[in-house]
């Protein structure tokens, strides 16, 4: 299938080449991640029983719900801008306001061009943990950051 552009939808994009960009850290190499998950939306529904109708229950739409955006990577240095941001949220005892920021996730092709993109508005960390250490495995120590956000949009 020669001549089909990757960005025009000729091939399905691979899930292993992606980029995460935080508004405050744009252009920095600090935002390399091993895994990104939690991209999605769900409409909450409310059951409504109609009088005299026993065959089914109506499901009325309520609001859109978003899972947390989960980012995993090797444990970063304490001077990392992302670590500094997380520390300001979790270690400041709410003495300073939480500063949310926009986050973009790009799925890239082999030419480093984005083929899919999602934006997350007003994201901030709500969970920051180090995955278990295990003396029987030879793996990189991983930190997991979970972000809550107001809403997301698929851009491409």
Image (cartoon, helix red, strand yellow):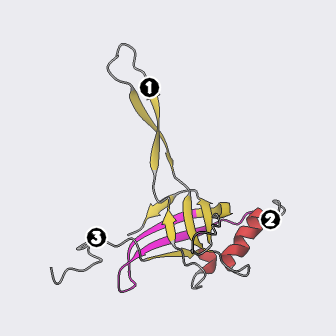
Does the residue at mark 1 contact the one at mark 2 (Cβ under 8 Å)?
A: no
**Magenta stretch secondary structure, dominant:** strand
15 falls in the magenta region: no
Q: Tell me the crowding category of disc 2: few under 14, some 14 to 19, or many 20 or more residues within 10 angstroms, Cα based.
A: few
- Mark 1 or mark 3, whichever is nearer to me: 3
Residue under the image location 36 percent in, 13 percent down:
52
In the rendered view, does 6 fall on the left or right side of 34? left
Disc number placed over residue 91 in the picture, else none: 2
Report, in whole angstroms, how far the alpha carbon at label 1 lies from the one at label 3.
40 Å
Q: Tell me the crowding category of disc 1: few under 14, some 14 to 19, or many 20 or more residues within 10 angstroms, Cα based.
A: few
Residue under the image location 73 percent in, 63 percent down:
98
Read off the residue under disc 3: 12
Q: Position of residue 137 (x, y in %)?
A: 57, 70
Residue under the image location 27 percent in, 78 percent down:
6
Q: Tell me the crowding category of disc 3: few under 14, some 14 to 19, or many 20 or more residues within 10 angstroms, Cα based.
A: few
Q: Nearer the viewer, residue 136 or 88?
A: 136
Identify the secondary structure beneath mark 1: strand
Q: Position of residue 56 (x, y in %)?
A: 34, 23
Residue under the image location 53 percent in, 53 percent down:
67
Q: Nearer the viewer, residue 111 or 133?
A: 133
Provide the residue span drawn in magenta. Answer: 98-121
**Among numbered discs 1 and 2, the one appearing first in the sequence:** 1
Does the residue at mark 2 contact the one at mark 3 (Cβ under 8 Å)?
A: no
Q: Residue furthest front?
A: 136
Tell me if residue 4 comes above or below residue 55 in the rendering.
below
Tell me if residue 109 comes above or below residue 156 in the rendering.
below
In the rendered view, does 105 fall on the left or right side of 1? right
Identify the secondary structure beneath mark 3: loop
């Amino acid at each position: 299938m020669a001549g089909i552009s990757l960005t025009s939808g000729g091939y399905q994009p691979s899930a292993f080449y992606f980029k995460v960009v935080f508004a405050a850290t744009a252009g920095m190499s600090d935002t390399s991640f091993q895994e990104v998950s939690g991209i999605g939306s769900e409409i909450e529904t409310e059951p409504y029983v109609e009088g005299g109708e026993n065959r089914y229950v109506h499901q009325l739409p309520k609001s859109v719900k978003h899972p947390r955006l989960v980012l995993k990577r090797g444990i970063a240095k304490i001077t990392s801008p992302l670590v500094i941001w997380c520390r300001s949220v979790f270690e400041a005892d709410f003495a300073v306001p939480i500063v949310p920021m926009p986050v973009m996730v790009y799925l890239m092709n082999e030419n480093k061009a984005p083929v899919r993109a999602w934006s997350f508005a007003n994201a901030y960390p709500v969970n920051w943990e180090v995955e278990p250490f295990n003396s029987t495995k030879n793996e990189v120590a991983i930190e997991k950051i979970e972000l809550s956000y107001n809403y997301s949009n698929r851009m491409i």
